[in-house]
Image (tube, rainbow, N blue to C red):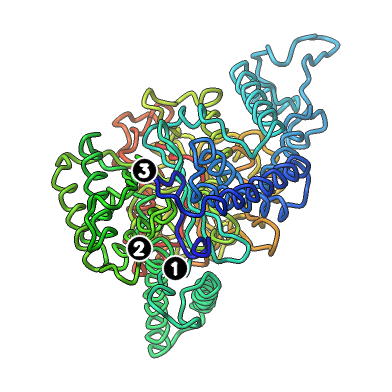
Amino acid sequence: MSSLTESTIAMPMGSSKGRMRDRQSTRDSIQIILERSQDAYLRALEMSAASGRVEEVRSACLSLALLRAFQTSLGQGSEIITAAAAEMLASTPAITLHRELLEKIEHKLADGPLDDTKWPVLKRAVTMDHPTSVADSSTPVKGAENIDEACLVLSSSPKQTDRDSAYREYWKSVRARYRASFLQVDQEQVDSLPAEWVIVTINVTEDKNTMFISRHQRDREPLVFTLPLDRQGRRDGEAEEDLFTFDAAKEQMKRIIDESNDGARNAKHVTSQAGKTAWWEKRYSLDKQLKELVANLEFCWLGAFKTILSPRPALSQSALETFGARLERIFHSAIAGGARASDVKTRVQLDTPLLECFAALSSKCRDEEAEDLVYFILDVYQFHGVPVALAELDIDLIGIDLRSALAELEASRPSSPQPSETVFLALDKNVSCFPWESIPILRGRNASRVPSLPFLLHQWSMRDLIYPLASEQGKILVDSKKVFYILNPSGDLSRTQTHFEPWIQSMEKQAGWKGIMGRPPTELELEAVLKEYDLVLYFGHGGAEQYIHSHRVSKLTRCATTMLWGCSSGALVDQGDFDVRGTAWSYMMAGCPALVGTLWDVTDRDIDRLSESVFSKLHLDPSHVSSSTTAATTMLPISAVSLPEAVAKSRDECKLTYLTGAAPVVYGLPIWM
């Protein structure tokens, strides 16, 4: 038990045959204590989950997950325990958002006779001479463009009414699901997701010493790792002040972004050649520091277990079994040492989810990563009652044998390319500030952020009720004609306006786009645009918070896919013990399918390069417009890539591939044009 806090624990952990008898009485007494603690936490959650203090609910959920990890390490693991821990971890990152969403749904469903964004509907407009129904009349009214304008009527077509009804039914279903429990995940719903979707949740304990990283995927058993964040440094004997601790990483991240934000804001004041040279040197230095930081997040914290984020290799069951048997021989022989291997009676087998995860590790991985996996498997043997004399083992030699097994496995893989996966990241309040999409194993891959797994499930359920353009392959399509742009609303981004104005004008002519240029939108305008269009492009400062309040956004029953290319538009604000908040969450609560925003301040030229590349990859350009000359009937073809993939593949278009390239992130679903 003394090694538990320093060891990586997996759920599932593995099974053993011929288990050696250790101090079973001690093991049983500890198990009783763990079960009592678990029951106490479950009772507390039952009373407080819906309305208790958020920080206490979160703490109870993480404590329960840790207790279940300890139970698994003691040989009491099961599919039920793994699933219970995984679903609790997957629900924890957005407790406040779930509660706020329930409140916002009440506003969405409230009948709104006093809705100040609509004219009151007059079903019949009666005059002395012509008692005619306004809605049915086709006679032009003098001095007005149409009858609605003349009579102050906003009439709804049957199609619009049907769509509004569909949205109401959708929000009712979300309310019912959240009222039942937002801390539970229905595996059948997970199995309804596309097979190429992977949901990875990252949580950090209150003491910032342990990270939980869990994975859900259709038709697969959940997988959870409990990772001590300082395990590699302590293993190497590093001094306390040299360890890459959570607090040290967060402090370094804050310093880099603070210095970057200051530089971005002061760029317009740098006029001399020497000043410009010094400014660029500082920017490139920060870019390098950020690249090193995200590499350390992967190397020091995830280590060999980074493969939980990797696509599952296309391996036959026999190849996987052969790999498992090879690992068993390597470690069984190493532990037996000078004795005959047959003298060690206990045989430990890793579960299939673990084998699939480790099979994705490259045979050319760094020595420390191979060592990380070696120590993990040795711990598995110890947890199953096998005494392991670590001081007598040649860890380097075991690592060489492990690399050999991985190389043999790589040689057996089919040469055909694997289908790409979309990784959804559900990040708790402690880790959302880091650009996880740019760690080496995720850089360039499809990755999107979601508040939690339950939130993704209800977003995905929206497609059946609402999206008329959902394709047979399950892709959620956005009508690329129904686009509204807001370009330089503050009037001081003349360079950005000059850069995009020709492109926008051509899209107005060929695709029928509409928008606002060089003036601020009113709140009513922006609210109407978000409700009526399929895609909204914003090129201005921030996340347009100065033009529409967040509470107005979150109360919308429908919200367009939105790209906010302003500074820090996708950042979530740290609020201490409470959950993070930000513009992105308001759009998610409004039903926004997907949102692009930046995590920190960026310079206009560099982010313009990236956004231009995104538009090109999504086929939002005149070269992909149909040959039809009628804008009303022109449809852009389905894009070759999804929105998250377009953003991922555009990061290197920037001069500062990390300081600017890592800033944009996608929230929500992988939509296609």
Q: Are marks 1 and 2 in contact (CB under 8 Å)?
A: yes
Q: Label 3: state its secondary structure.
A: loop
Q: Are marks 2 and 3 in contact (CB under 8 Å)?
A: no
Quadrant the C terminus occupies? top left
Q: CA distance from mark 1 to mark 2?
A: 9 Å
User: Disc 1 or 3, which lies upstream in sequence?
Assistant: 3
Q: CA distance from mark 1 to mark 3?
A: 30 Å
Viewer-closest of 50 and 223:
223
Q: Label 1: state its secondary structure.
A: helix
- Please give the residue where the numbered disc 1 appears in the rendered image: 231
User: Disc 2 or 3, which lies upstream in sequence?
Assistant: 3
Disc 3 residue crowd, few under 14, some 14–19, many 20+, Cα 10 Å: few
- Please give the residue where the numbered disc 3 appears in the rendered image: 18
Q: CA distance from mark 2 to mark 3?
A: 26 Å
Q: Nearer the viewer's eye, disc 1 or disc 3?
A: 3
Disc 1 residue crowd, few under 14, some 14–19, many 20+, Cα 10 Å: many
Tell me the kind of residue under disc 2.
Asp
- Please give the residue where the numbered disc 2 appears in the rendered image: 372
Tell me the kind of residue under disc 1.
Arg
Horizontal and vertical percent position of residue 580: 64, 57
Q: Residue at x 35, y 63 (%)?
A: 372
Disc 2 residue crowd, few under 14, some 14–19, many 20+, Cα 10 Å: many
